[in-house]
Amino acid sequence: MPEPTRARKELIVALRVSGCPVCRTAVVSVQRYLKSVFYEYVNDTGLRKRLHQSLGFCNLHAWQAVNQDLGNSLGFAMLYESVINEVLNRRIKTNSHNNDARALFPTGNCPACDAWDNAVDSFINLLVREFTNRSVVVALQESDGLCLSHLVQTLGRKKDWPGAAALLELHQEKLKDLQTELKEFIRKNDYRFSPEGYGSEADSWIRTISMINGLSKA
């Protein structure tokens, strides 16, 4: 049997981490991207152009860079001084008959959001390609599974994909197991059964949020 490829090994490792592996991979990718922006690309004309179009980073990623120390004060000052200059140079129509502020609308995506989308696409493409491998399927079975959003994206990634039915069935079973745990958690919140104490269902509610809503992007 041939040795697994590096990409497959990385996929299996990602599946062994708690939570949706697509979300987790994308979060790490965005963190790396933001760090690279502030330490390597603050003066990059291509980045400046993109930030002029998007009018800076989106709210989520701007504050992620601040709160997680992914950026630095000088980098923010330089990038956002340039963004302010872009805003001031845009032509805004205001008069007694018409106020049109459409010139202040972003004309491009937040670069960090694009980094998220690219990471998601790469992971899903890899998962679809490697889903025929037994070790990948087993790792997915033993994982928390994909969040609902990324499950939908994966199922719709490739027309007539033979693995779609198996992937869907796998996640339906995971959802049924979560539902059972939630019911047990709810039952034990009744004072009559609370002395039993909690088991694995204790964090079922947070795992359900992760499955339905995905992991936090920040």
Image (cartoon, rainbow, N blue to C red):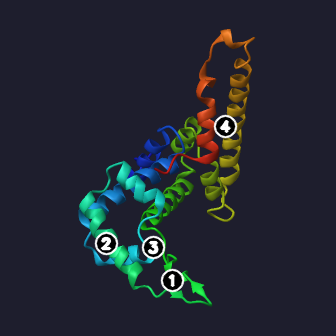
Which mark is first along the chain, 3 or 4? Answer: 3
Could you say whether the residue bearing mark 2 is in a helix, strand or loop? helix
What residue is disc 2 on?
A: 81
Observer-nearest of 92 and 143: 92
* Relative height, residue 110 to residue 202 (above, below): below
What residue is disc 3 on?
A: 54
Separation of residues labelled 2 and 4 (CA atoms): 49 Å
Packing grade of label 4 (10 A; few <14, some 14-19, many >=20) is some
Which residue lies at the image location 64% right of the left edge and 49% below the top edge?
148
- CB atoms at circles 2 and 4 under 8 Å apart? no
Which residue lies at the image location 69% right of the left edge and 48% below the top edge?
168
Residue 12 percent across, percent down from the top left: 46, 44
Separation of residues labelled 4 and 1 (CA atoms): 48 Å
Callout in the foreground (2, 4):
2
Could you say whether the residue bearing mark 1 is in a helix, strand or loop? helix
Packing grade of label 1 (10 A; few <14, some 14-19, many >=20) is few
Callout in the foreground (1, 3):
1
Residue 45 percent across, percent down from the top left: 29, 78
Residue 7 percent across, percent down from the top left: 42, 53
What residue is disc 4 on?
A: 174
Callout in the foreground (4, 1):
1
Separation of residues labelled 1 and 3 (CA atoms): 12 Å
- CB atoms at circles 1 and 3 under 8 Å apart? no
- CB atoms at circles 4 and 3 under 8 Å apart? no
Q: Which mark is residue 185?
A: none
User: Looking at the rendering, which quadrant does residue 1 occupy?
Assistant: top left
- CB atoms at circles 2 and 3 under 8 Å apart? no
Q: Which mark is residue 103?
A: 1
Callout in the foreground (4, 3):
3
The residue under label 2 is which amino acid type?
Glu
